[in-house]
Image: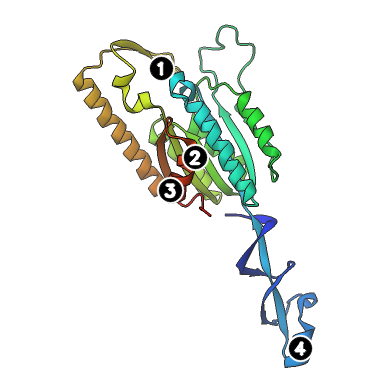
Amino acid sequence: MRARPGERRFPGRPQPSGLEVEAHSAYVAGDDLRHLDWNLFGRLDTLLMRRFTAEREVVVHLLLDASASMGIPADDHKWGVASELAVALAAIAIASRHAARLIVLTGSRGPGGLAAGEEAPVPLSRASAVHRRRAGLVAMADLLDATIPRCALDLGDRLGDYACRHPEGGAALVVSDFLLEPERLEPGVAALRRRGYAVYLLQVLGRGEIEPARVLGSAELVDVESGETHSLALTADVIARYAALLEAHQEALRALALRQRATWISFVSDTPVEQVVLQDLVRVGLVRAR
């Protein structure tokens, strides 16, 4: 996972230098004589090298989708739940003596130009510093509070760009509704895996996206990212077709995660974040219950 030196110690992974002696190994030519155990040499007449407990930390990269679809419909609170989950995961990482960094992937305005009243193009992403103390959670929360989900986002391209700019690896936790074609997402996930990231795809869907008949009747649907409109009457046949397409989409995303050796979970935005963390994330091994 391309871990770097940090505060947390990992017994069972002895290294040539460190603070706490864990084991010994036979001296071979070229070993650093500063770590030769002279006490054992005096007692056993054998040259033995001290091996030390490895010290490592994992940098947890929280990549949060802030495209327009994450804020629509507002009643589903997808953005609020995704933000709460991101802060909770950052808190768990820091409490576990790892480091956390929040990256908000904002949408970019399409060919149609700026929206009315919009003063400047939206930046491609906003990121916090790498935080190792709980005080950093406030900075992350402030970043989320200042973000309004909007515009379109090519999530796969953005993940690939992030992997290129940050090749150090770690754990990449991608929080999104993943409402895009899986073939557009896969290159970004593959780029993260090539850089040594452990990738977790955390999907949050609104209740209305799971059960559209509960929130819609006959209406005109507007794609908030492309601006396209569609007249729709929610007949029984249309609802059945929608359910089949949604299941096919979810299955394609699960297959993508399997191919790329990523971890996939999906939950609905009306599920308490505490339940997601203590049940779903424990089940897939991202969080360990104490």
Q: What label sits on residue 41 in the rendered view?
A: 4
- Callout 2 amino acid: Glu
Q: CA distance from mark 1 to mark 2?
A: 31 Å
Look at label 3 and name its amino acid.
Gln
Residue 125 x, y percent position in the rendering: 61, 29
| Pointer 3 with pointer 1, Cβ within 8 A | no
Query: Tag 4 or tag 2, which sits nearer the N-term?
Result: 4
The residue at 21%/17% (across/down) is 235
Mark 3 or mark 1, earlier in chain: 1
Q: Is residue 79 visible?
A: yes
In the rendered image, residue 85, in percent from the top left (x then y), is placed at: 53, 36
Residue tagged by mark 1? 223
Q: Which residue is mark 2?
A: 274
Is residue 109 or residue 34 the one in the foreground? 34
Q: Secondary structure at mark 3?
A: loop
The residue nearer to you, when weighing 241 against 187, is 241
Discs 3/4, front? 4
Q: Residue at x 59, y 31 (%)?
A: 104
Q: Earlier in the sequence, mark 3 or mark 2?
A: 3
Return the residue at label 3: 260
Distance, label 3 to label 2, CA atoms, is 28 Å
